[in-house]
Structures are given as C-alpha cells and as structure tokens.
Amino acid sequence: MEKVRIALLGLGNVGKGVWNILKNNRETIMKRAGYDIEIAKILVRNTGKNRGVGVPDEILTTNVDEIFNDDSIKIVVEVIGGVEPAKDYILNAIRRKKHIVTANKLLIATNGEQIFKEARDMGVIINFEASVAGGIPVINSINESLTANKIQEVVGIINGTTNYILTKMTLEGMDFESALKEAQQKGYAEADPTSDVEGYDAVYKLAILTTLAFETKVNVDDIYVEGITKVRPKDIEYAKELGYVIKLLAIVKDVNGKLEVRVHPTMIPAIHTLANVNDSFNAILIKGNAVGDLMLCGRGAGELPTGSAVVSDIISVLRNDREGLNASDVQYNNREIANSGEIKSQYYLRITVKDMPGVLGKIATILGKNEVSILSFIQKPKKEDFVSLVLVTHETLEENIDKSLKEIKNLGMVDKVKNVIRIEELS
Amino acid sequence: MEKVRIALLGLGNVGKGVWNILKNNRETIMKRAGYDIEIAKILVRNTGKNRGVGVPDEILTTNVDEIFNDDSIKIVVEVIGGVEPAKDYILNAIRRKKHIVTANKLLIATNGEQIFKEARDMGVIINFEASVAGGIPVINSINESLTANKIQEVVGIINGTTNYILTKMTLEGMDFESALKEAQQKGYAEADPTSDVEGYDAVYKLAILTTLAFETKVNVDDIYVEGITKVRPKDIEYAKELGYVIKLLAIVKDVNGKLEVRVHPTMIPAIHTLANVNDSFNAILIKGNAVGDLMLCGRGAGELPTGSAVVSDIISVLRNDREGLNASDVQYNNREIANSGEIKSQYYLRITVKDMPGVLGKIATILGKNEVSILSFIQKPKKEDFVSLVLVTHETLEENIDKSLKEIKNLGMVDKVKNVIRIEELS
C-alpha cells in the first residue's frame, strides 16, 4: 500500500496517544485511510528526553524547518497547544501546502478565521475535532450530520477537570480544595489549575462551538465566564435539597435573534441526563430545529480519546485529499452577542442574616421592587450567630439581581451574600 | 445560486419531514450545500390524496420513470421503506448515475452489499444515516469520526416504540398491553406492532451497525432476537429490587474474535446512563479501543428527526459531488458470528413453585450441576398456592441455562418458569 508521510509538532500526552493509536491500529487504519501512514518527523524541544513510547530517536527533531522543507510530508499534526509558536508553525505549513490536523482549542478559538482563510486560499484541509471535547465527535456532528438544522442551543459539560471536582463535591461531600488536590493527584488537573477551574478552558471550546453552530465570529473576551472556585459544599447541599445538581455549563443559545454565550456554575435538575454525567466525562447537548435534542457523551480528554479524534481527522484528510476535496468552509458572520446584563436566568441566592423578625420581608421587598420574584425559599437553622436564607427566583435579568444584591448587602441585618448561582431548567 | 433538482420516492412521515425542513431552513441549507435544492418530483401511489403540507400537485407523480428519465435530477431520496419496490427503484436510479439518500433500514440490512457495490461501480454516493436511530449521527460517527478505533462493542436502545412501552411499564407500573395501547394512541406504535415489539426493527438496525462497526457481512437471520412481549410487571418490579432496569438492547460485541450479535430484553444497572434513556428516545453506546465509551442519545424516529438525517445526507452528497468524491466504501468482510448457545450472560430467572421445604435446594442442585452459579436470590410471599423464586446467576453459557431449565420444569414442585431475562452489567 502507498505510504504517506506525516509530521507531529509536539510529543506530549496527545502526541503519544497519536503515536500509539497509529501503531496499535495500523492494519485497520491502513484500510480505512487507503494509505500506510508513517510518522516521518516529530518536533520536540528536547531530543534527549526518554518518553517511553518507543519513538525512534532519528525521527525526533528540534528544527521545525526540517518539516516545512520536506515536500514529502503531506500532513502536519499540531499538538503543542497555545497560540505561539503553534500559529506560526501552522501558517507556515499551510503556505507549503501541507494539510493540518490540530487539537489546539485556544488557537482555533482566537485565530480560527485567519487560519481557515489561509487554508482555503491554499486549498489545504484543516481538521480540528480534537480541539473540543476530546474523542466526542461534536465538531463533525455540527459540521456534517446536523447541516439540515438551524441550531438553537448548545449546552455542554466540556471541561473534565471541573466536572471531576464537582462530582467529588456532590457525591462524596468533599470541599473544593480537597477535590482539586485529588484531581491533581490523578492527573486530571494541572499544577496550575487556573484555566480549568476559572472556566477559561471551557470558554475557548465554547467559542469554537459557537462559531460552528451559529456560523459567527465570537470574541472570547465577550463570553461571560465564572469558574467553580466559589462553589461551597453548602451550595451543593442546598442544591440537592432543591432537586438540583451543580455543573459547570458552557451555554450558547439564540434568544430572540441574539446569542447568549456563557460559562458558569449552573444548577440543573437532578433528573436531567446532563446532571448524571460524572467524573471527567464530557457531554454536549445540541438542540436543532429538526433533530430536536441530541446528546453526545464521552471522554473529553486523555491521551487515547483525544488521539482518537486526531487520528480520525488524519484519516479524513487522506480520504478527502485523494478525491481532491478542498478546505472546509467555516463561516464567520457577525451575529449579535448578548451582554450578560441582558441574559435572563433563574437564580439561587444564599444569604446569611441576623436571626431577627422582618428580615425576609425586607429582602423580599427589595427583590420585588427590582422585578425579581421568589419561586421558593428555605431558612436554615442558626449557626455562629447567623441563619442562612436560600432563595430560588423566577427568571429575571442579571441587572435586576445585581441591583437587588447591592441593596440587600446594605441592610444592617444582612451578614453576607454567600453565593449566587444560575439555574437552568434545560427543557 | 445554482439550482439542483432532486426527487423523493414516497411522501409519508419522513417524506413530509424532508419537505418541511427543506422549506423552513432553505436559506441556511443553501449556504451549506452550495446549491438551491429543489424537489422536482415526488413519487406517490395516489396523487389525489390531500397531504396537508403544501406540496404542489404538479410535482406529484405515480410514474417512477418520469424520475429515472429526467437527467436533470441528481439525487433520488428513497423514503418508501421495505425491500421491494424500493430496491428496484434504487438500483435503477444508481444505473442512471443518480446519487441516493435512503432511510431504509430493512433494505440496507438485507441488500446493502449489492447496493453499495453497484453504487461504487457507477461512481455514485449512497447516504443512509436515517436508516438507524433517526436523527442521531451514529453512522457518520462510526464511518467518519471513529475511524482511528478498533470498535469493540456497540450497545443500543434503537427502537423507540419498545423503549416507550418499557418506560411506561417501569415508571408508571403499566402492563405491556396498556402501554402498547398508549403507544399506539400517541403514534409511537403502528396498528400492527409486530416488527417493533418482537425486536425485528432493532435487528435490521443492528445488522447495519454490525457491518459498519466491524466491517463484516451479517445475515439478519443469524441475529438472536427476542422481543418484549413476555416482560411482565412482576419482572420490572423484581428488576427494580435488584437494582436493574429492563431495556430492549441491541448488542454487538467482539468476544475472543467472534461477534456476538443479539437483540433481547436486558436488565441493566439502574444507575447506568442507558437505564435513564426514557420514552421514545434512542441511545447508542460505542466502545472503541482509543475513544473509550462514547454515547449518542436523541430522537430515533419521527418526521423531523429522521428528516434531519435525510436532509443532512442530501447536503453531504452535494458537498462531496461538487468535489468529485466517490461512493463510500462499506466493507463486507466475513467475520465469524457466535451462535446464541456460545454467548455468556448473567441471567435473571423467575420461577413459581409450591411452598415446600427443599425446593430451592433442588433447583440450586440442578443449576450447579449445569455449571450455573447463583449470585443472588429473593423469595416472594405465597400467592394463589405458589411462591415466586427470583434468582440472579453469575455469567454462564445459554446452553447451560437451557439444560437447567428443562430439568427444573420437570420437578414436581415447580409450577412454571415464568421468565428468563439476560443481565448486562455494562462496565
């Protein structure tokens, strides 16, 4: 069978996954791709390091030009991550007419439009399934399988680290810090967990999903983001009492023609399928005007699941290149993005107050004045001088909640607004 | 934008869905397909019938040759169902170099190999996403997104009618007959429900999934099938006590190089995600050696969900035809299919016996002699002269169960073997 030579940029976890899959599934992949795929070069920072996956030393290089200048290399697989130097490498490879497979969410989220344009101009393919939700074929589903639909909403658990932490807090009663530590010990969270726990990782993936599902530009800085660091065991406990589970959701929906795009901890009904997606699993719910609700669930990270998406993308390049297919045509229109102040949600409010008569009345009056109505209410027994009030509101604008909370904080009998968490009923 | 003319064969539910989607999502579909899609002809049996979807009379025809002989028609969309005349029509269209989109599970399951071969020879595309699980992109996932994987197992709830019935029995305590009647009233079950409730519909879909996931021929008659008509409220109740839920599962798995392919009511752990896929929803769990466990869940039937798959397939033909892509290359190798006697399962046995000492001992002795060991056991209070014994076994061969049950039935103190249901722990 004809050989085809490809290069990897990077040999971290995903790179190792790609290497192992191409080795272990070689026979079946050959039949499906129509080629015998040979990894001809791998760009690494340090050729001396032992990586323990049996990569022969002679294909490692620290000089990316060896890859660019090798005309026999048809596909460049970028698994370095980050904007630079990945962007520079990818653009260079495109200009040398090499097809690209990338797992780089940050790069596609922030520089996708330019990259797709240059690829289109050069007639090369960019495949990037691995950039969102690892092995789950969400990009292919939106780009290929759901093209008959106007997509109305995409809601996802697309960060495995935070889902693992929230699962531990929910099912085992851990606090955030212990759950984070366990996630780090298991390799689910990095030494610096900021990008995961503050929600940025989910924002990049959501930006990509927004562009694909709604064919629009979206600036990652315009996406509302709130991480999970402020979720307390008490919130998890009260959520349970109210019939909810807390998940970090990435949400984009078309509301009256504007797009709401946001990442935040969210209470969702405990009986909803998404509420039962646990540990480091990811899940994405897509609502289309023909297909209805479609859910995809699987491993959103890890060497082999992400490698699965990368290698399937490589095979797809080879199948399509053989037939002369051109670059995928990602649309970057200008849909209007809603400000967070315009977004309507239900809210959960947890407030500690002095144990005095009339306090609920005062709070309710402030809420009512600001057009926030109360759906349900629980008062918790006194603890260290204060009682906790847990309020669930009807749907209201964020600005109404903000105004209310400012006034509530100024009440003499109020100790603290302990937490504010959005609720989605997820029809 | 350039127009492209297509024809529908059939204007039942799916045909109407296709018509409505092409009308309602016309603008977005045009951009994605690169063509303005016009339904030029629709083959019907009776042009006089009012179908209430606003199809102009002049495009209806009862003469299929008007479609075959019209060279301007690029794609034939077959939504009649059944083997003949659908097969004859599709082969005729292929021979006239028209691309095919079909929703026909029975035809693809039984005649796929011939149809794909003729299409390959003529250089036309056959798309058939709608043939399995309606709008859920399971075929595209296996054929495109998971090509990096050796697939090890596919387990699905792929018949919405039986899932609706079992859900009603499980959550509302209905018996089979009442649940079936309700399914018929809601349009989920047909007047003659045989194909659904006896499992044949699921068998056809499983045959297609088996061919795609394991690149093999499979004869529908070689697939073990057992419907849900023998599932009693008592079984549902005892399943719950044991921590299980009963679902009609379609299963194909590679066990030591042989394929087990079967459709039967199955007890699965109540906490498993599949156990919570309710009503007429479908779900498919795919286990690949790289991606791990992937689940797809959504609407497996209905005008619009199935129409979503058909129309997305039409768009896919147009995108690929433009670039000169050839027919998809479905592989029909000869994988060995296991006989049902060779398949190991856990079993649930419900047996009514006379209330006498020693009866459990006799039954346990027979089971032990036949290499069936008991995992758990419940005895139910006496009712109408008999007590019910509920036994859960460890994994064993079907032939061991068969032999045991033959002997157990001959025990004087045994009234009846009321039911035998397989259990899958679904790791």
Image: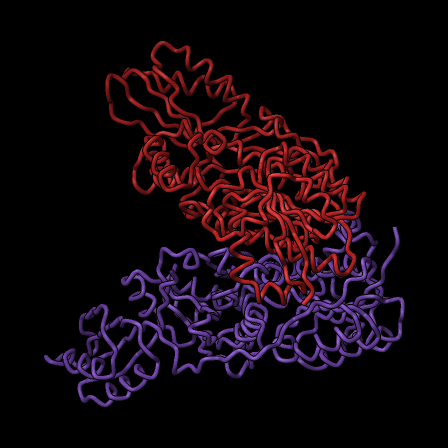
Chain colours: A red, B purple
Q: Position of residue A426 (x, y in %)?
A: 51, 43
- From the viewer's perspective, is A125 left or right of B355? right
Front position in the image: A34 or A205: A34
Name the quadrant containing residue A120.
Answer: top right
Front position in the image: B294 or A421: B294
Q: Position of residue B223 (x, y in %)?
A: 50, 79
Relative height, residue B187 to residue B358 (above, below): above
- From the viewer's perspective, is B21 left or right of A83? right
Q: Quadrant of the N terminus of chain A?
A: bottom right
Relative height, residue A248 to residue B333 (above, below): above
Q: Residue at x 71, y 63 (%)?
A: B16
Q: Residue at x 85, y 64 (%)?
A: B40
- From the viewer's perspective, is B274 left or right of B330? left
Relative height, residue A98 to residue A203 (above, below): below
**Can residue B380 be seen here?**
yes
Name the quadrant containing residue B364.
Answer: bottom left
Q: Residue at x 49, y 24 (%)?
A: A372
Q: Position of residue A21 (x, y in %)?
A: 53, 57
**Can residue B285 be seen here?**
no
Name the quadrant containing residue B396.
Answer: bottom left
